[in-house]
Image (spheres, grey):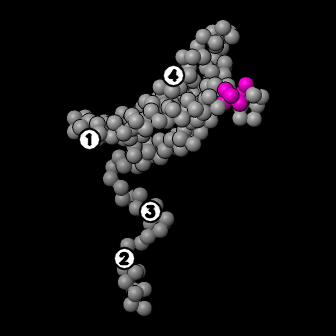
Amino acid sequence: PAVAKQQSEGQASGPLAVFKGLRNLPRGMPQVLIVTGLTWLSWFPFILFDTDWMGREMYHGRPDGNPTEVANFQEGVRQGAFGLLLNSVVLGFSSFLIEPMCRKLTAKVVWVMSSFIVCVAMAMVTILSSWSLGDIGGNVQDAAAVDKGLKSAALALFVALGFPFAVIN
């Protein structure tokens, strides 16, 4: 009985207490939580499916297709994995720059800048996919000429996302 009485006098815990606590957040904090939640909603699919995206949409391969499609898919996955390696290198170097940037620009500016970079990068994923799959238009010769540039742009996108990922983590 004494233990039960002590537990009931403490602060409430559980999912309901979290929602009740949201009412007591400082001004501006709900917007930060919303932006962070939306940012993570874009990160999870990117992290899970980025190599598959490279193989299917940038290299026009299929894991269950004919031998040429399988080879294209595997090359795209390799390039995507290489992009993730470079992403990790950029993330590592960026982690050393975050504190000096926060002192110079403020933490708020650095956070907003990284969230903006993520937003632009995810829009670029859509644009690169559409371009690669020929949804934007043009003819076959244009697509063949741009194809190398699209693959390089996709790889650069992987690398550039190292900085905002370092800020968010």
Q: Residue sitting at 44 percent across and 35 percent down?
A: 87
Q: How many marks?
A: 4
Which of discs 4 and 3 lies nearer the camera? The answer is: 4
Q: Which amino acid does label 2 sit on?
A: Gly
- Contact (CB < 8 A) between labels 4 and 3? no
Q: Name the residue under label 1.
A: 99
Q: What stretch is highlighted in magenta?
A: 68-73
Mark nearer the N terminus (2 vs 4)? 2
- Contact (CB < 8 A) between labels 1 and 4? no
Q: Which amino acid does label 4 sit on?
A: Ala
Mark nearer the N terminus (1 vs 3)? 3
Q: Name the residue under label 2.
A: 10
Mark nearer the N terminus (2 vs 3)? 2
Q: Name the residue under label 3.
A: 18
72 in magenta: yes
Q: How far apart are marks 1 and 4 (CA)?
A: 29 Å
Q: Residue 156 in the image: x percent, y percent? A: 47, 25
Q: Is residue 13 left or right of residue 124?
A: left
* Residue in the foreground of this view, choosing between 8 and 131: 131
Q: Residue sitting at 64 percent across and 25 percent down?
A: 59
